Amino acid sequence: MEEKDDEGESVCRPVQPEGLFMRVKKNSIPRCFLTRLLTRFSLSLSFLSQDIRNTVGNIPMEWYQDYPHIGYNLDGKKIFKPIRNKDELDEFLDKMENPDYWRTVHDKTTASDIRLSDEQVDLVHRLQKGQFGDVNFNEYEPSVDFFTNEVMIHPVTNRPQDKRSFIPSLIEKEKVSKLVHAIKMGWIKPRKPKETTPQYYDLWAKEDPNAILGRHKMHVPAPKMRLPGHEESYNPPPEYLLTEEERMAWEQQDAEDRKLPFLPQKHSCLRAVPAFSRFIHERFERCLDLYLCPRQRKMRVNVNPEDLIPKLPKPKDLQPFPTTMSLVYIGHTSLVRSISASPTGQWLVSGSDDCTVRFWEVNTGRCMKTLEVGGAVKSVAWNPNPAVCLVAVERTVLLLNPALGDRLVVSSTDQLITSYEPPEEDKEQAVTWALSEGPEHDNGHRLTLTHPKAVKQVVWHGKGDYLASVMPDNSSNLQVLIHQVSKRRTQNPFRKNKGLVQCVSFHPLRPYFFVATQRYVRVYNLIKQELTKKLMTNCKWISSMAIHPGGDNLICGSYDCRLAWFDLDLSTKPYKMLRHHKKALRGVAYHKHYPLFASGADDGSVIVCHGMVYNDLLQNPLIVPVKVLKGHQITHDLGVLDVTFHPTQPWVFSSGADATIRLFT
């Protein structure tokens, strides 16, 4: 820093680092400023050892570019520049070979190179990060609050008051008298007080054509008030007075729905009429009408309402679809939670809360086999591979061979299960696999997968070897497991589950896995092991999910009476929301071959919709509701619990809380 000595000469004094950097504001220091600052700092330290000072002052150093000296010392002698004969090649070699090149700074004021010390480099780093210059400075020191809201016994300072605190200040008196004299003489003009009176202007006056309000081509005059009628008279005719029932109805109505904003009253004479209680309110509403009224006339476009409704085909043109109830499968004694059809379409399996699994012949409605499983069955799934005769039942997942249909398929399925050879090294798995023996084997039990928690859903992969099970539990990461039957291997695909898993499903064609939580559907790529998509369902709680056989569309049913159709190529938000059901949806299903999908809900109905997906990617799917199928009785506020389609025919099966299964053809 430059200061003046006794003779008036400018003297450079070294700058103290703490005092210099303590006032630097955080995150506001450019890099060039830091370099210059540190250069001067290092210079000031070097000046202590040798007296090569630049006393020129704060002038551009380009002025001394062509001279051999750079400023003058206190004796008036020239301060010569250090000999510097480095060219670009020397500079490059210095850059490559000198290990301290990165911390060397060129000072323009003295034309010399200065090597920064470790402390100075640390100081630069701290200032660049927005930290304080002093290492030992603690910016988070606890503040000591001397003055609190509590009255203290002893004062903080017991110093007596100064004499000047109660004697008028003569200096201030002199200043005030000078200001008063200047105002009197007109040298100081006091500020004009601001006008506090509000300025009003008429919105409805004839505006200037150049003004904003006057540019409207079709100006609307101010709306006129309605003239008073007989009901506003102080002595209205008797038919205008409200009866007691009408008065009660008027009071229960909302203010917007009332025909009159007041109650007509009868008075004997004009002198007996009281003051109108709603006068200020009415004036305020009138002002709002004038203020909020549009002052431009809009031309009404005459549109036929029928043109706004999209043209949908007639249901007759969309046949075949199920229309009538053909068969009722009776045998269960409690609500039937889940049904599944065999890939050939000849058999149907059902699971119920009466702790049984029943196998039915579809065409006759005859119960072929009943198996006790020792607990309520929430989910059953028939293996979709026609070469394997296996049924997965949710009760610590059981794999059953019902021994129905082709005997070769039944025997080959048993051979597939018995031909398993355990590996040499047994890895620890989350599930215990056990082969059934004895009477259980005779009943059809083949494999038992003991899960750590209760299973809610089982679902097969399209090839029939993999099986997924869902154990909803928000506190655990073990919610979804994937099992391989041929190798008897189980894996947990997710380290962490985001939310409570409701249901899962495999993609029919590609290696994708769909996981539905309460509000979202996440699509995972099983080969890349990554999240591909996250679908926002706009529903409060998802109940069921089905994937189109083409794999590019998905439907989700929810407990808040909505069905969301997703076009996976289009968006992560629903392409269409259907609100046809009045109560919670329990099950949704796609047909494998026909453009049909169905949904069952607690209102006891099954709604069948035509859902055509086109090969042309530019054409949106056509969704048309075609039939409402009823027949199930509502029991304990529960209606239809599950729906599934026949694999080959346009038939739909539904299971309900009334312990029946119904076939609609």
Image: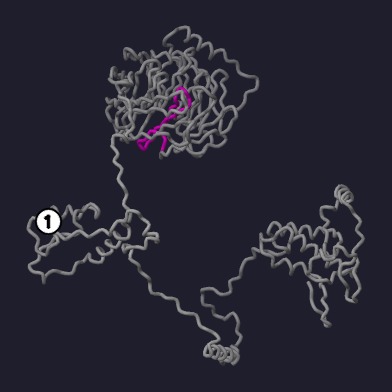
Task: Check the image and tell me how it is coloured.
Answer: one colour
Residue 275 placement: quadrant: bottom left
Q: Quick check: is 554 in the magenta stretch?
A: yes
Q: Is residue 107 shown left or right of residue 243?
A: right
**Nearer to the camera, 282 or 156:** 282
Magenta residues, as a range? 541-563
- Can residue 261 be seen? yes
Q: Could you tell me which quadrant the N terminus lies in?
A: bottom right
Q: Which residue is under mark 1?
A: 242
Residue 525: x and y in percent read 56, 29
Front-lying residue, 191 or 164: 191
On screen, 420 above or below 206?
Answer: above
Identify the residue at image location x=55%, y=86%.
187
Q: Nearer the viewer, residue 360 or 154?
A: 360
**Position of residue 126 in the picture relative to residue 457 (left or right):** right
Residue 472 visible in the snapshot: no
Q: Residue 365's spot in the image, x, y percent?
A: 32, 15
Residue at 55% from the left image edge and 21% from the top image edge: 484
Question: Left or right: where does residue 340 sit relative to residue 15?
Answer: left
In which quarter of the view is residue 370 placed? Answer: top left
- Residue 351 in the image: state x and y as whole percent: 38, 23
Relative height, residue 620 to residue 328 (above, below): below
Magenta stretch containing residue 3, yes or no?
no
Between 83 and 263, the one nearer to me in the picture: 83
| Quadrant of the frame with the C terminus | top left
Residue plotted at (50% across, 83% down): 190
Horizontally, residue 403 falls left or right of residue 54, namely left
Question: Total label count?
Answer: 1
Give the residue type at disc 1: Leu
Residue at image coords 53%, 14%: 417
Say if 567 sits above or below 109 in the image: above
Q: Give x and y (percent) for residue 165.
A: 57, 89
